[in-house]
Every structure is written in structure tokens, then in C-alpha cells.
Amino acid sequence: MWERGRLPRKPRPSPILVPPPPPSPPPPPRLLAFLLPRSLLALAARAMPSRRPSPLLLLLLALALAFLFLLLSPSSPSASHLSSSLASAAAAAVSTPASSSPAPVKIYMYDLPTKFTYGVVRSYMAARARAGAVGAVSAIPDDELRYPGHQHSAEWWLFMDLRRRGPRDRPVARVDDPADADLFYVPFFSSLSLVVNPIRPSAAAANASDAAEPAYSDESTQEELLVWLERQPYWRRHQGRDHVFICQDPNALYRVVDRISNAVLLISDFGRLRSEQASLVKDVILPYAHRINSYQGDIGVDGRPSLLFFMGNRYRKEGGKVRDTLFQVLENEADVIIKHGAQSRESRRMATRGMHSSKFCLHPAGDTPSACRLFDALVSLCVPVIVSDYVELPFEDVIDYRNISIFVETSKAVQPGFLTSILRGISSQRILEYQREIKKVKHFFEYEDPNGPVNQIWSQVSSKAPLIKLLINRDKRLVEKGINGTDCSCICSTTKELLRK
């Protein structure tokens, strides 16, 4: 008992008695030390009682270790099976890493009638042949035909790439069965078809009795192509939504573009296309093929005495009217070369010399916002000065054009002295940085490069496949799609009424 009002005393803790450590177990027999690693021996030692183990226990342990030794022996079938399983798993892990590339998109290329492919090339050559040589052009085998040098030659490069089937490690894979395809490529040479008939008739056409009416009609060829396509079940299945056309010239396929606007269009810009016909969402911007020789030297400014160079048609329509104003502003500048010149072999030689010896190359808008001179400048390591407010540029998912070009608003570029003062203020070191960045991406503009624009175009096309699938599935479940209201898909959508025309 404790006194009233006082807390009880805390009991005094009893001293902690630490038991003496158990005696160390006897060392294992030499056989066990030989068979087991030290870690296992230590574990076995801790499991043994403090007293000396019985001979029976040691015998059982020895038999278990012998069985384990046989199981892990390299000559054992079980060990071989285990090793092969581990090797297979390791190989699978290496071959399918988490960051591995996705499977290529399967693309089917239509086997069009020859008149839409090689026939266009043959017609182009025949229209420019000398009198009496038209028959020789007709006799050239398809495989020996060559696409004429042209800024819109992307249609030839894509066609030949799919014919060769290209390397395996690329974004698309050509399939022979259309039932296996994700996308369908229509290899019509639409840009070349547009210019088959020369502006000035050849001697052969001038001497022909029917020279008043050209033998080749681009408009008729476009119509015949659509008639052929509309008979194909895979075109009718989704109204062409999963089809791909190349129409790089701004006027290519102009007669039928409303009937193919559901498809993926490979174009250079949107200069002649309406918003309901084309968009960045579904279409792909292509680079023009460069017309001048690529510069093979290294970066540097010492061999480039000219500040700014331009050679091209001075008088253009629409947005290209700015060219005439730029000529007036720049033609009297001492270190600026600006010349009027039409397409010709001699003009290309002069342009090559000018771009290879200039620090900056002017890229004003033409009849449409883009032109091949931008890509001529890039393969020349001549820093482009872009005066085109609505230009669209290829491969902007992998190229930041601010690192390789200078953009100037049209309203400022036409002010006297504005453009040259900006360019003269750029240091040689900064020009070298521009050239260094251009050199890194130069291959994206050289169609002859195996890792060049062809592969990147297919990468862009393949990226459209998920959206195409989404829209196809969406169209299937829509009960009624209004044609007078806003289409919430925010993408071109050709109505069925128009497709039936």
C-alpha cells in the first residue's frame, strides 16, 4: 500500500541478463566445403544445432547437395533446358526493348494502267521529240524510261521506292494483297501530266496534221483515273479515306481534287487549295527537288563574297507580286546579286555559281507561297532568307527552321535598306552556326540520299494512319452526317453526294 496523496514508486527494473553466446558449430566436413559456396555453408551452420550433428543428418545433407550439383551440371539436360530458356528470354528482351520502333504501316500500291505512270513520261518525251523521232520514244521499254529533271520529281522517287520495296527498317512496308493494307497509294504522275504539252509546240507537233489539238489531255487523264479508281472496291469501301495521292504542283489534279479530298494529299503548299480540300491534319508537305548541284564543300564564309543572291522570274501572280518590289529595292545594292531568269540549263549553272558563292539566298513567294529555290539554297549551304508570310515547310516535326533560315515579314522586307541592314549585322560566327545546322539536315532535301526525303515522307504518311482509322470508324457509327452544319471532326470530309457526281 502507498500513502494517501502520494504516487506509487516505480518498480526498479531488474538487471538484463545477457545469455552467453552459443558455442560455435563444428566446421563442416571437407566434402561440404568443396560443394557449397561460403554463403550456403554459413546458412547451414546457423541451421545446425549447437551440439555435434548426427552422422545421419550429415549423410542426408550430402545426398541433397550431390543431387543439386548434378542438376546444375552443364552436361545435365535440365541445366541445358534452363540455360536455353534464360538465353531465349534474354534475346527476346534485347530484340523487343521498350523503345523499339512500331511495326511499319502496310501500304498497297495500285497497279495502275501504264498510261498513268510510264505513259505520262513517254508522252512528255514524245511532245518534245524531233520530227520523226516520236516512234523511237514509243519503243523505249518502261524500265529504261527516266523521269525528266523536274522540281516535282518526288512522284517518281516514291513510285520507284515502292517498286524496289526499299529497306525493311522504314515506316511503311509494301504489301501485295490489298486486304492486308492500311493505306493505298495511287502512283499517278499528276505534276508531270500537267506539263506534258509544252507551251511552245515541238517540231514534231508543228508538222503534224492535228497540231491544233494536242494528242495528250491532262484533264481527260484525270477523269479517266477517277473512273478507274471508282470501280475499285477498296476505293468505294471508305470513299478513298485511306488512299494517298501525290499532287505536288499547285495545279495538279485540279479537275478532280474535290472528289479526292478525303484522301491524304502529298503537296508543296496550300496556295491553290481551299480549307475543305486540304489541311495539315490529314495531308503531308513535301520538299521540292532541288534543281542545282548540291554544294560538296565544308562550311565557311571566305569563299562567299556576295551578301545576298536571287535568280528567278521577276514577275509572278498573286503573292509573288512582291518579287518585283524586292527587285526595285535590292537591285542597286553593291553586294547583292538579284537577276531575272527563266528555267533553262544556263540559268541553273548561273544559279549554282551564285548560291555557292553567297552567304544568304533570298526566297520570296512565287505564284504560291513556296518555291524550289528554298531547297536549292539549303543544299548550297546558303542561308535562306524567307519572305513569304504563308509558306508551309516540310518535316517540321524534326526540323526547326529558325535554326537554318531567317524569316522576314513581307511588309518590312520591301522597305528600302531594311533587309540588307539586317543581313549585314549578322556576324560571320552566326553564319557558320546557320551553315552547321543546315548541314545536319541537308539530307532531308536530297531525294537521291537513301536516308533522305523519301523515307521522311513515308514517316509522315504513316503517322496519318491512326487518324484515318479513327475517322473511318467514326463514319461507320454516324447515323446522319449533316452537310450544312459544321463538321466537328475538323478535317476535310467529302460528302457522298459529291462523290457520286
Image (tube, grey):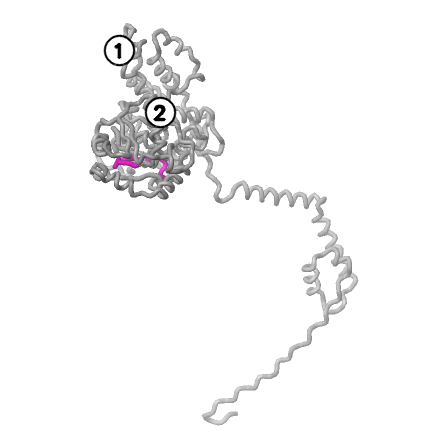
Report how many numbered discs are placed on residues in the image. 2
Q: CA distance from mark 1 to mark 2?
A: 35 Å
Q: Name the residue furthest top.
A: 209
Q: Which mark is residue 213?
A: 1
User: Which one is in front, 415 or 163?
Assistant: 415
Residue 477 in sight: no
User: Of helix, strand and loop, which one carries label 1?
Assistant: loop
Task: Compare residues 386 and 67 and report the one nearer the observer.
Answer: 386
Answer few, some or many: residues within 10 Å of disc 2's Cα (few below 14, many 20 plus, some between 14 and 19).
few
Classify 129 as above or below 62: above
- Identity of the residue drawn at 38% across and 42% down: 433
Please identify the quarter of the rendering in which residue 495 is found: top left
Which quarter of the figure has residue 108?
top left
- Give the foreground label among 1 and 2: 2
Q: In the figure, is residue 168 to the left or right of 426?
A: right
- Above or below, 217 relative to 383: above
Q: Main secondary structure of the magenta part?
A: loop
Q: Position of residue 441 (x, y in %)?
A: 40, 37
Which contiguous range is marked in magenta? 385-396
Choose between 450 and 331: the one closer to the eye.
331
Quarter occupied by the C terminus: top left
The mark nearer the N terminus, 1 or 2, is 1
Amino acid beneath label 2: Arg
200 left or right of 43? left
Mark 1 surroundings: few (<14), some (14-19) or many (≥20) residues within 10 A:
few
Please state the horizontal and vertical placement of residue 242, each as a whole percent of the image: 37, 30
Is residue 1 found left or right of 472 in the rendered image?
A: right
Residue 284 in the image, given as x and y percentages of width and height: 34, 33
Say if the magenta span includes residue 368: no
Task: Tell me the residue that label 2 is attached to.
Answer: 349
Check disc 2 and report its element: helix, strand or loop: helix
